[in-house]
Image (cartoon, grey):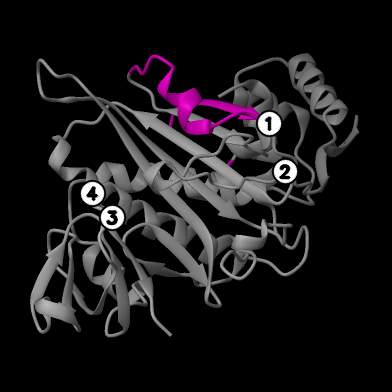
Amino acid sequence: MSTKTELLRMLDQNFGGWVSGEALANSLGISRAAVNKASNSLKKAGYKILSRPSQGYKLLERIDLMTEEAIGSRITDPCRLKVFDSIGSTNSYAKALPIGEEPVVIVANEQTEGRGRLGRTFVSPKGTGLYISIAFRPEFELGKTPYITMATALAVCHAIDSVCGKQPKIKWVNDLFLNGKKICGILTEAQTNLETGRIDSLVIGIGINCYPAKFPKELKDIAGSIADEQDEFSRSALAGAVIQNIFDMLKEFPNHNFLPEYRRRCFILGKNITVHQLSGGKPIKARALDVDDSGGLVVEYMEGFRLREIETLTTGEVSVRE
């Protein structure tokens, strides 16, 4: 992390209180002049920092700035972090970068070419959402990637719980809902080596609707947001919590201990649903029974020649029937 990021982290940890220049210099391993230089740079970026010769430095206001310093100060694991005001697609950008030992994290305030599952457009308006991609070199085989999407959904839920005070639910396999509306989508993409059969890199893409936005007509009754008003919480704090939660999850992976909580959060279990076939066939009415230990959705069909047949879905899409 940069000196500015580490300085901001220390000031944030002591928010509202004074931290002496000497203490900051000793902790950061730099001179007091370097501390002052980093502080002035943060002030120019918009941070309200008060400095006094006899007292040191104080962070006066937690501003929701989408900067590498603001987000990075909330991440404890090493990573290559890049923050953009606007970008085509965070996933596309991340996939084009070389992946080394440290994960690459891309965060954007807006996406102009956001992508969702099955090639759909993911509407990503400026100033109201949070768009994150984490690219890394996994140590597990391709067959374990469905668990990544499920574990990521829980990691994002926990971040929203802690930062926003809200408790979203999960629609199998990768959508988060709050008050009956979708607030988050997750897209996991793998780049594989055909010769070795291993994954060269895995990219987790996360799009979160933070504040109310003007969505297209077809999404107006489907898409919601975490907060009812702008700036109810810090998007940079939420971004940092999401990223760190995912890093913590990856340390435990491929442990499946998260499945019981995933089931509790999965609001479609026990409900009537519609199964949309990827082959383009007619949607089928069904009832969602369970999520099995492999992450598949166990359903019982409620119509047609498959009436009363039970199947475990590992791919596809479902919607809730009213």
- Quadrant, the N terminus: top right
Which span is picked out in magenta? 74-100
Residue 86 numbered mark, or none: 1
Q: Toward the viewer: 10 or 65?
A: 65
Secondary structure under tag 3 reads loop
Report the residue at 85% width, 35% height from top: 46
Q: Toward the viewer: 110 or 58?
A: 110
Q: Do the residues labelled 1 and 2 touch (CB within 8 Å)?
A: yes
Q: Is residue 76 visible?
A: no
Closer to the N terminus: mark 1 or mark 2?
Answer: 1
Residue 280 numbered mark, or none: 3
Against 76, residue 227 (above or below) is below
What kind of residue is marked 2?
A: Lys
Secondary structure under tag 1 reads loop
Q: For the residues marked 1 and 2, what is the alpha-carbon distance in whole angstroms?
A: 8 Å
Place residue 8 in its image quadrant.
top right
